[in-house]
Amino acid sequence: MRTTTRNGTRTRSSAASRRRDSRNGQTPPPPSAATPRAPCPQEHRVPPTRNRAYYAAFSKVNHALVGTPGVTIKLGREGLNHPGESGTGGIRRWIVTHMPDMEPPQRVKLSELIGRLYTLRIAADYQPSVDVDGRDAREAVSIMNTVFDAF
């Protein structure tokens, strides 16, 4: 710091206060004056958790099904459709009929898990009136882990 005299007043200035913002000529605030960023409230993290858990599980199952004999993918797409409005179409139908290296009861259970994750994801993304709490996020992550452990 150095001491300067301005109109008879003694002031102290630092290198930071002498720097000028080239865009508007204003002195930038010192680092200590920066407002800390508030942490994201818990309720704002739950919908993305449900969304990402669904997409992770969907991607793993989709990858296993693509290339399986008998599974057809629409022209111009790289994978299967989501379960759809009824929650039973798309990838769920292919899981039940074509999931490799699984017995029929396991296929049905896997399809149900994907359907549940899809329901959680739709509520998170498109139904803001649905009450969301940490249990939903934990359920979504638990289902995702079950799907990943299944094969």
Image: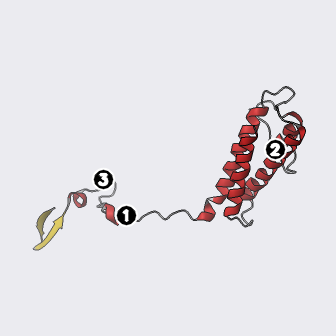
For marks 1 and 2, give the one nearer the viewer. 2
Can residue 37 be seen by looking at this rendering? Answer: yes
Task: Say whether disc 2 or disc 3 marks the residue closer to the N-terminus.
Answer: 3
x and y, in percent, of residue 87 in the image: 85, 50
Task: Say whether disc 3 or disc 1 marks the residue closer to the N-terminus.
Answer: 3
Q: Is residue 82 above or below residue 121?
A: above
Nearest the viewer among 107 and 114 is 107
- For this view, does 130 lie left or right of residue 93? left
The image quadrant where one finds the N terminus is bottom left
Q: Is residue 2 above or below residue 75?
A: below
Looking at the rendering, which quadrant does residue 59 occupy?
top right
Residue flagged by tag 2: what amino acid is it? Leu
Nearest the viewer among 95 and 36 is 95
Residue with the mark numbered 1: 34
The residue carrying pointer 3 sits among few (fewer than 14), some (14 to 19) or many (20 or more) residues within 10 Å by Cα, namely few
SS state under label 1: loop
Q: Is residue 75 above or below residue 144?
A: above
Residue with the mark numbered 3: 22
SS state under label 2: helix
Can residue 77 be seen by looking at this rendering? Answer: no
Looking at the rendering, which quadrant does residue 78 occupy?
top right
> How far apart are the alpha carbons under marks 1 and 2?
50 Å
Nearest the viewer among 134 and 36 is 134
Residue 110 shows which numbered tag?
Answer: 2
For marks 2 and 3, give the one nearer the viewer. 2
